[in-house]
């Protein structure tokens, strides 16, 4: 019912997941990230604990293959599930159960993994991957959205469109970007719009938010406002 991409940005080290489907609120269940460690996407007849327990296993130092083997071994519904995992080292593993609905499957490349089910065809993943590789010069968030839009142009979810999401983490426990379109006639276009809006203030503001290295962050409102205003003026 879904296709997704998990990737590691080689420039920033960020882990990102983008996903789209013909189902409600896909961002609430599919993407899970352990900051600085790896990411998990759980889909098809989704098992939320694949994400919840998957990031715990990544934090324990398990490889993506070990994570998947552990998760599916404990689940009698494994053949109706799909999941894929990437870690900060770029290692990838995936599982597509025998009961997932065609077209279904998974592919991987250097620093990225894709998986999908109930798709229009294999070209959805192939074109998503091709666009991701071809747009390496784009900022990470934009690169992931452009890749997903290419997959949609190839047919996407064969039932249609409803929701999409983009989740990106850096080193911190809080997300650098967490966008959800839960119910929309053109969710990837709306996701793209929201990413553009995020650049108006959030992308600048997040540099002032407390971090583990700087627990107070920046609280001088004059500095914050001036930085945001300068960034907006530069784009005008």
Image: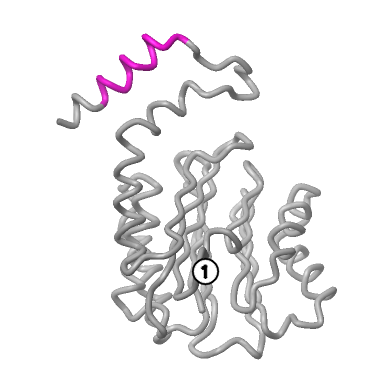
Q: Is residue 100 above or below residue 26?
A: below
Residue 67, magenta (yes or no): no
> Is 1 left, or right, of 39 in this rendering?
left
Query: Does 76 appear above or below 215?
Result: below
Q: Quadrant of residue 42?
A: bottom right
Tell me the residue that label 1 is attached to: 108
Q: Quadrant of the C terminus?
A: top left
Spot occupied by residue 69 in the image (x, y as percentages of width and height): 78, 71
Q: Is residue 145 left or right of residue 99?
A: left
Question: Looking at this rendering, what residue extends furthest in the left direction?
Answer: 236
| Secondary-structure class at tag 1 | strand
| SS assignment for the magenta stretch, majority | helix
| Residue at screen point 49% across, 60% down | 110
Identify the colour scheme used: one colour
Q: Is 91 rendered above or below residue 161?
A: above
Q: Which residues are magenta?
A: 220-231
- x, y percent for residue 217: 55, 17
| Left or right of residue 56: residue 97 | left
Give residue 49's position: percent from left, percent from top.
74, 64
Is residue 126 placed above or below 27 in the rendered structure? below
Viewer-nearest residue: 127 or 167: 167
Seen from the viewer's position, the closer of residues 106 and 47 is 47
Where residue 29 appears, x then y in whole percent? 61, 62
Say which residue appears at 36% left-offset and 64% top-offset: 187
Q: Which one is in front, 14 or 110?
A: 14
Viewer-proximal residue among 225 and 53: 225
State yes or no: residue 221 in magenta. Answer: yes
């Amino acid at each position: 019912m879904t296709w997704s991409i998990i990737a590691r940005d080689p420039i920033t080290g960020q882990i990102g997941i983008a996903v789209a489907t013909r189902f409600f609120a896909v961002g609430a269940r599919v993407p899970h990230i352990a900051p600085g460690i790896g990411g998990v996407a759980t889909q098809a007849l989704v098992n939320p604990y694949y994400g919840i327990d998957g990031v715990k296993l990544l934090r324990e130092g398990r490889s993506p293959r070990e994570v998947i083997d552990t998760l599916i071994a404990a689940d009698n519904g494994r053949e109706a599930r799909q999941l894929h995992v990437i870690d900060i080292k770029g290692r990838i593993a995936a599982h597509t159960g025998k009961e997932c609905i065609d077209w279904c499957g998974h592919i991987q490349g250097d620093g990225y993994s894709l998986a999908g089910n109930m798709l229009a065809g294999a070209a959805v993943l192939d074109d998503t991957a091709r666009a991701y590789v071809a747009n390496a010069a784009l900022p990470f968030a934009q690169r992931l959205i452009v890749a997903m839009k290419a997959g949609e142009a190839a047919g996407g979810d064969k039932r249609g469109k409803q929701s999409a999401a983009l989740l990106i983490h850096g080193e911190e426990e809080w997300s650098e970007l967490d966008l959800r379109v839960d119910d929309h006639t053109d969710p990837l276009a709306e996701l793209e719009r929201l990413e553009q809006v995020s650049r108006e203030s959030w992308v600048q503001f997040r540099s002032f938010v407390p971090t583990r290295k700087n627990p107070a962050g920046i609280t001088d409102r004059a500095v914050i406002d001036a930085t945001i205003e300068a960034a907006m003026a530069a784009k005008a």
